[in-house]
Image (cartoon, rainbow, N blue to C red):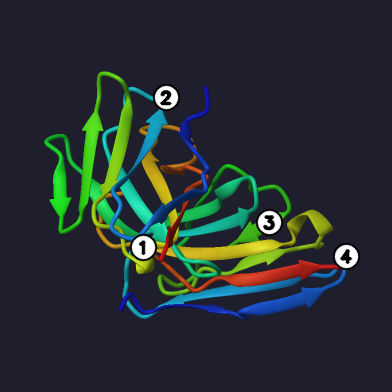
Amino acid sequence: DAGITQSPRYKITETGRQVTLMCHQTWSHSYMFWYRQDLGHGLRLIYYSAAADITDKGEVPDGYVVSRSKTENFPLTLESATRSQTSVYFCAILSTREQLSGELFFGEGSRLTVL
Amino acid sequence: RKEVEQDPGPFNVPEGATVAFNCTYSNSASQSFFWYRQDCRKEPKLLMSVYSSGNEDGRFTAQLNRASQYISLLIRDSKLSDSATYLCVVNRPSGNTPLVFGKGTRLSVIA
């Protein structure tokens, strides 16, 4: 068990509101990732973090903000939610130190609906 | 050409059948390859890594063809429980996305 939890699992919000999705790992793996999954697009990387206080943009970072003040937490914030951000969001951790190998463990996902 | 491309399917096969999926990738510098499985409304989970020499895990065989830049997944003696979406994952050696996911191939095994 990778010990990765996401909250909330389900969220309905309105356009313009701020939303924060939490990701917590009980291990101390360095790399953490946020993906969104949409029909027709597959999994797309939003942001990732190599360690505490180190974050990098992924493929689709616009409209999102992340932070990593502690190794175990990697929150994703939508500062002003838009309907196009309705999606399933997955947090993931990498099981080894090396970025390019190893297994990605995913959280169960957070389903966000923006009305 | 898309960076990682898969036939979306669906592949509808009877129990006991053998089914194969291919995945093509465009970056010749890619070095790491994986197959993930995703059940409906669940998170993706690693099925197997793909090694240059090919590798087998029970009914599942993964192969890599660097010359043609594709990886394959073969499932023998399909079970109902194999019904899922299979995601091809390839590393990108540079840029802002270390691992690139294909959109997935949906498999339905029918009794």
User: Secondary structure beneath disc 4?
Assistant: loop
User: Secondary structure beneath disc 3?
Assistant: strand
Tag 4 near tag 2, CB within 8 Å: no
Residue beneath label 1, please?
B82
- Mark closer to the chain start, 4 or 3: 4
- Residue A110, compared with residue A65, is above or below; it is below
Residue beneath label 3, please?
A64
> Dot 3, crowdedness within 10 Å: few (<14), some or many (≥20)?
some
Labels 4 and 3 positioned on one and the same chain: yes
Q: Amino acid at mark 4?
A: Thr
| Letter of the chain that mark 2 sits on in the rendering | B
The alpha-carbon separation of the residues under discs 1 and 2 comes to 28 Å
Residue beneath label 4, please?
A15
Q: Is residue A52 left or right of residue B20?
A: right
Quadrant (top left/top right/bottom left/bottom right) for the C terminus of chain B: bottom left
The alpha-carbon separation of the residues under discs 2 and 3 comes to 28 Å
User: Secondary structure beneath disc 1?
Assistant: helix
The alpha-carbon separation of the residues under discs 4 and 2 comes to 38 Å
